Amino acid sequence: MTKTTITPAIHYWGTPVLLISTLNEDASANLAPMSSAWWLGWSCMLGLDASSKTVANLRREGECVLNLASTQNAEAVDRLALLTGSAQLPAHKRMLDYRFCADKFGAAGLSAEASTQVAPPRVRECQVQLEAQVVDIRPFAAQDPRMPVPACMVELRLLATHVDPALLESPGSHRIAPQRWQPLLMKFRQLYGDGAEALPQASRLASAHPEEVYAPWKFMA
């Protein structure tokens, strides 16, 4: 099969969508969607915008909850797409039409419930909730001239895993039945689940801006 060499503006080949809950300085909850995460054992690595409120909260508080979104959470995720918990928006977020929102749970139409080992709340509507502790935060892709904004990688240690019993192979089991778990995926800024689009319309990220806005290097001389 012959292949074509391309230069895509972004590399979003199908990654799971998370809602990360953290605590702000005033102990209120911040909730942010993201889709650059992977797991190995009981450790997790996140890729995040270094200027985000989530990163600031992780540096200060050292803990969070990773609420894994399923297809049934697609609308809530989309409502959060262009919101930020930072009252002072960095230049790139102003350009992308982000706006400040103090109550992310309310804006998304989601409910908070207490965690068992960390202070940030879980998202009740998410079928999988992973309580986690920060191990390390480091710069990411600092040498990549195509990275449009400073980024960082966050290593987390998972402390507790909460799941909807409907996802288990059998009552009391500790094994997930893969066919019962339908994770929400980000594919090139569109939301998908089980091979089909998860929204009846284009996602806010996809409809607000072309992919090239995330790739300023394409316009460099």
Image (spheres, rainbow, N blue to C red):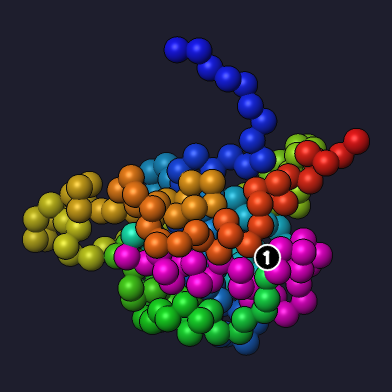
Q: Quadrant of residue 65?
A: bottom left
Q: Residue at x 20, y 58 (%)?
A: 167
Q: Which residue is mark 1?
A: 52
Magenta segment boundaries in residue numbering: 72-97
Which of the pair 132/188 is nearer the observer? 188
Camera-side residue: 127 or 10?
Answer: 10
Q: Nearer the viewer, residue 208 or 147?
A: 208
Snapshot quadrant of residue 23: bottom right
**Residue positioned 42% across, 81% down in the render:** 109
Q: Who's the residue at 25% across and 53% down the image?
A: 181
Residue 52 lies in the magenta-colored region: no
User: How many numbered marks, from 0 up?
Assistant: 1
Q: Which quarter shows the N terminus?
A: top left
112 relative position to 31: left or right: left
Image coordinates for residue 73, horizontal then vertical, percent: 37, 67
Residue located at (47% from left, 77% from top): 108
Disc 1 crowd rating (10 Å Cα; few below 14, some 14-19, many 20+) is some
Nearest the eye: 73 or 212: 212
181 over 65 or under it: above or below:
above
Residue 56 visible in the current orientation: no
Label 1 element class: loop
Q: Position of residue 40 (x, y in %)?
A: 42, 42
Instruction: Return the residue found at the far left.
Output: 171
Q: Position of residue 89 (x, y in %)?
A: 76, 72
Amino acid beneath label 1: Ser
Q: Is residue 21 visible?
A: yes
Tell which residue pokes out farthest to the right in this image.
221
